[in-house]
Amino acid sequence: MSNHSDTSNQIGGSKPVCFVKSWQILGLDLDIENNDIVSTRKRKLPPPLNQSNIVTKFKNVDGRLMECSQKAVNEFTSPCVNNSLSSYLSWSPEHQIYSLANLNNIKDLSDKDVFSKLELPSQLYEYYLNERNISNLYDWQKECLCDIRLLRGSNIILSLPTGAGKTMVAELLMLREVINNKKSCIIVLPYVAIVQEKMNSLMEFKKMFDIEVLDYAAGKGAIPPVKSAKDCGTIYVATIEKANILVNSLIANKRINEIGLVVVDELHMIGESMRGVFIEQMITKYLMSLSGQIIGMSATLDDMTCLKKFMKAHVLSVDFRPVRLDQKVKILNKMYYLDEREGQGKLVPVPGGMDNNLHDDPRDFGGILPFLKPIIPNQGVLIFCPTKESCENLCGTLSEILSEDPVCADGDLRKEELIEMIRNDNGGRICEIMEYGILAGVCYHHSGITVEERDRIETAFKSGIIHTLCATSTLAAGVNLPARRVIVKDPFMFDEVYTKSQYTQMVGRAGRAGLNSYGDSITIITSRKKEKQFREMIESSYAKCRSQMVKGSSDYKNFQILLLDMICLSMAKTRKDLEKIMYCTLYGYEHREDVIKVLNCVIAKLLEFKMIKIECDIYAATPLGLATQSANFSPGEAVKIKQELDYHLENGVILSSVHHWIYILLKNDISLKIKENKLHNEMEYLERGDPQMFSKISDVSYPQLVAEIASQHRLKPKFAKIYAFLMIRRLLKGESIWDVAKEFSVQRGSLQNVLQSFYTHARCIIRFSEKIPELWSVCHLSPHVIKRLFDSIFPTLESLRFVKMVDETVYDEFLQMEI
């Protein structure tokens, strides 16, 4: 392989140069580009550096040559590094700079040349060529990967359609970071299922280059991470929530400089109420730590003026999709195609319409069959349904119809094997609709199925055993299950039309490079009222990504969390530090005039909650504040949890069984659909000790509590925690998840989610208690209770290794418990 990093191509002489970004040093509100969106065809290279204004006296910081402007040196202040220039420089990432003689010639480079310019091993090029069948990089990928700003370490936002190849660019840049620069990376993904999929795809690189690839989703991943003994960096694959916790732990342990690159997939989610808050907080902390580079990726971003300033990033936006996607819409009995050539959607009638009598069947109330039969069974179809119930109903209808077709009901032995595997996972049971559906090549997919079922079904769809998958909208932003055709049946949720971003993700699943040469989508609208809402959505622009830090929160809870983090992590010690942090958030760029008002309110709340103290104008966290930050609770939530724990300990915990302690460790805000009669019957026939427990945990006596439940026509949300406890109580007796879920009329996946939530919350309470001496009993007894529960669900500890909701880290924790 040719080496393109010779000394003639390095600025500053024969040694590698690390550039200090002046916007990072000065904390300036800079517009990174003159234009909001920089097209790859119009992008300009930055002007050449004025060598007379370069300072080179900082040559021996961690053995690297550092260069920055004199102005940057003179004016540098940062709350993160105690105003120390050398501290900043010691954390700077090492990024080689390559001199590109002519940007116009980049498209003429071979793929091998691009890999060489990135100094990536030749075996990686061979792997993409032979194993992933990627023989040619797209022009935009070449230009991006050879962009001098990106290679210097500048942040970038990639805004391209689904399937355009953003993931490969991110993979190559992560591998460059871990192999060449010996730095670690975090890739941030929205859902646990996508983390699992990404883990599988990165395992080849783990074997190939002997690098660590670690899973940080749900209850997985050590906090702080264990330092790797390997020479290369580590790739952390994390959900949004765990990425935020991971960044906190690395900053707290003075290890954030190990992270050279953070990749944020589905960046548009920064505009969502829950996940968006975690994304904004995580990016803010990583930017303020001055550690490395951020790459944001999305297919549905619009108006990135504030977003790019917040991320200190330039934007690469290309309207490119390698596989043609045709979008059609059926409104009542008329067919339209979607024309997006002018930037906004326009429905154009299809001349002659469509022959809807083809494959017609009176059982097909949704009119799905005419669009399904021409594609299956040789190619895959995804059908998006509005609810979990509608997924299962449609699966049942289609399996009944298709079972009469010898082409679909082909007696494939792999279908029988799939059914048997699902039975084995579920203790000999399988849903009847799922079983009959699989035999006809159809199945359903939603959050109510178990983790094991989900994994089996996704694998079967990818391999062609299942050709039709009825799914809820969460699959669109979930695992990568590309299909030849996507059918969207009434794109609504609770009478509200999907956002344009959600809809684009759904139809974008049709036709993917390397799998299909063409893709199309059919959207079915069944009423005039829905037609009006759908047309308005299609003709609109994508929703602007706006900060969610203060939305729906009069006490600015999210800023309480962020500023408490900053104080606990020693990233802010004065009010001026806190102001600078507030101004550097996405909210700060959008609402600069409100920052001081919000800050005053947040400081007052943190003082009221006794989370912080101020002495001689220096801000510091109290033990309660440190415990709150360690457990990743909000300050208001932590105060309530502390009060509840104190109440239980002062009034006595019944230790004749683990029931009372399990109730203590359960979250208060559990979302479950309660079967009223079942709750009442279970409460009437409790075991010894449980009636006394309920008298202790409620404001009324046990008989009064039972009477209150019986009199409720609509049960209060607080009873969901009791309902969850009663299900766990049955699991402790050795009953299966399948049987308990059926008896309590909840979906088996929902019960599994309750268990995962219980375990995650229990770990948070343990971390919280570790920081508060008077809660020593909670800290010491909780692990025993957790182990007792898992021992009941899984007969042997060794069986934990084979359960997808419990990983090796959790297994090791159980082994270390001295019981």
Image (cartoon, rainbow, N blue to C red):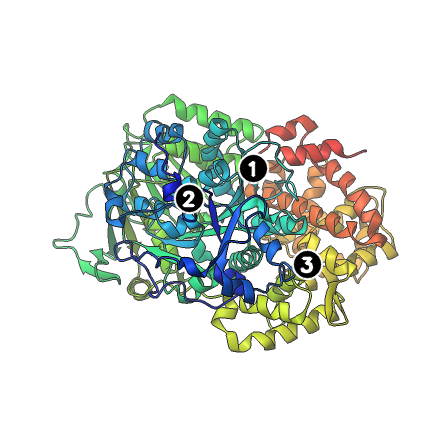
Find residue 214 and name its label: 1
Circle 1 residues within 10 Å: few <14, some 14–19, many ≥20? many
Image position, residue 505 (x, y; %): 37, 51
Residue found at the very far left of the displayed protein: 352
At label 2, which amino acid type do we have? Ala
At label 3, which amino acid type do we have? Ser
Relative depth, front residue between 335 and 463: 463
Look at the numbered discs 3 and 2 and tell me whether their residues touch, using CB distance below 8 Å. Answer: no
Image position, residue 369 (x, y; %): 27, 43
- Indicate whether 196 appears above or below 724: above
The mark that comes first in sequence, 1 or 2, is: 2
Quarter-of-image position of residue 648: bottom right
Q: Viewer-nearest of labels 1 and 2?
A: 2
Left or right of 614, for residue 217: left
Residue found at the very far top of the displayed protein: 413
| Residue drawn at x 41%, y 57% as measured from the top left | 51
Find residue 170 and name its label: 2
* Residue 349 in view in this figure: yes
Find residue 629 and name its label: none
Q: Which secondary structure lies at badge 1?
A: strand
| Residue drawn at x 71%, y 57% as measured from the top left | 628
Relative depth, front residue between 509 and 705: 509
Left or right of 285, for residue 347: left
Look at the numbered discs 1 and 2 and tell me whether their residues touch, using CB distance below 8 Å. Answer: no
The mark that comes first in sequence, 1 or 3, is: 1
Relative depth, front residue between 659 and 128: 128
Q: Viewer-nearest of labels 1 and 3?
A: 3
Q: Which secondary structure lies at badge 2?
A: helix
Q: Quadrant of the N terminus?
A: top left
Image position, residue 60 (x, y; %): 57, 47
Find residue 570 and name its label: 3
